[in-house]
Amino acid sequence: MKHLLKLQDLSPEEITEILNLADQLKYENKHKIPHRHLEGQTLGMIFTKSSTRTRVSFEVGMYQLGGAALFLSSDDIQLGRGEPIRDTARVLSRYVNGIMIRTYKQSDVEELAQYGSIPIINGLTDYCHPCQVLADLMTVREFKKSLKGLKLAFIGDGNNMANSLIAGGILTGMDVAIGCPDTYRPDASLCEWASKKGNLTITNDIFEAAKDADVIYTDVWASMGQESEALERAKVFKGFCVDEKLMSVTAKDCMILHCLPAHRGEEITDEVFEAHAKEIFEEAENRLHAQKAVMVKLMKK
Ligand code: CP
Ligand code: NVA
C-alpha cells in the first residue's frame, strides 16, 4: 500500500490490518503509552474545502505520532492561483513526508500521487471519503464485534460517502443497501465492481434499504460544492430522512452513524440523532485513531 486514494485499491487484509492497528493506537492513546512511530516526520495537509474533523484529527494525530502537520489552505498556496497539481506534487515531495488532500476532483488526488514521490492520503473528494469509512468500519467493529454478514444501509444522496461505504462495506463482507432517489445513485462503475464482489442493493425505497439493517448511515443532502443546488435537492430528498418510523424496520440494536456535520430535520431527526449520539461521536473520535493507523502504515520508515 503506497497511498490511500480510494478504498477499492485496498485488499480486505489491508483493511483489517489498518483496523487492528487503529484499535491498538486507540488503546495506547487511552493508556498514555507512547507511540511515536513518525518521529520527526511532517504531513502537508492541502484543503480546498472546509473541515473540522479531518483537519483537527490529522494534525493532532501527526503530533501524537511524534511528527508535525502543516495546514495548507488552497487560498494561501499557489495551487489556488493556478500552479499545476503536478508541480505542487513535485515541490512538496521535497519538503514533507506525506500529503493529505481534500479537494473536488478525484483525478487531482490521483495526479498528486502520480507526480509526487511520497504517500498521498485522500481526505475527501466529490467521489469518495476513504478515511471516514475506515473510522466507520472501526466503529462498527467496536460496537458489533465483527463486520462480516452485517447489513449496512445508507439513506440519502449517492455521494462520496455512499461510494466509500459501498467499497468498504463490500470489502469487509457486509451486505450494503443504498436507499436513494433514482437520479442520485452512487457511481455506476463502482456499483458494478461491488455487485461482482458482494451483496449490494440500490433502491429508491428507504424502508426496503433499512429493513433488518444492523447499521444505518446517513449524510447531508447537499455536499460541499453543491450549495447552489440545496433548494432543488431539498425537494428531491424530502422523505429520505432517518426518523423513528424508519428505525422501526431495522434489526434490534441497530446503530446509526453519520460522518458529520449533520443537518437535523433534513437527513435525520434531532430525536434519532441524539438517541444515537454515543455511536456517532465515537465514530468522530475514531477518525483520529484510524488515520493515525493509515499514516503509520504509509509513512513509517
Ligand atoms: N466527516 C468529516 O470529514 O468532517 P469534516 O468535514 O469536518 O472534516
Ligand atoms: N458528503 C459530505 C461529507 C462531508 C464529510 C460532503 O462532501 O460535503
Image (cartoon, helix red, strand yellow):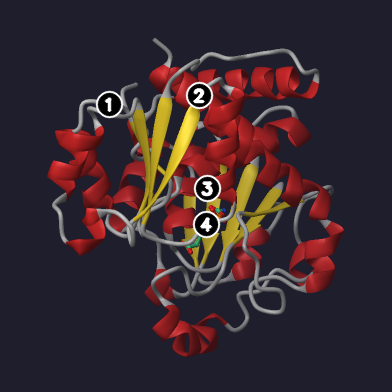
Residue at 48%, 43% in the rendered image: 199
Q: Position of residue 95 (x, y in %)?
A: 28, 29
Provide the residue designation for mark 1.
Answer: 118
Amino acid tagged 4: Ser
| Residue 102 visible from this viewpoint | yes
Point out the residue furthest to the top here.
Answer: 301
The answer to whether the residue bearing label 4 lies less than 8 angstroms from the nearest atom of ligand 1 is yes
Tag 4–tag 3 contact (CB < 8 Å): yes
Q: Are there few (<14), some (14-19), or many (20+) residues within 10 Å of tag 2?
A: some
Which amino acid is tagged 2?
Gly
Question: What residue does disc 2 label?
Answer: 67
* Mark 3 beta carbon near ligand 1 (under 8 Å): yes
Q: Secondary structure at mark 1?
A: loop
Q: Amino acid at mark 1?
A: Ile
- Secondary element under disc 4, as helix, strand or loop, is loop
Q: Residue at x 69, y 41 (%)?
A: 285
Q: CA distance from mark 3 to mark 1?
A: 19 Å
Q: Tell me the quarter of the image containing the N terminus.
A: top left
Q: Are marks 2 and 1 in contact (CB under 8 Å)?
A: no
Looking at the rendered structure, the secondary structure element under dot 2 is loop
Question: Disc 4 marks which residue?
Answer: 51
Which mark sits nearer the N-terminus, 3 or 1?
3
Q: Specify the quadrant of the image occupied by residue 183.
A: bottom left
Residue assigned mark 3: 55
Among numbered discs 2 and 1, the one appearing first in the sequence: 2
* Residue 30 shown left or right of residue 153 in the figure: right
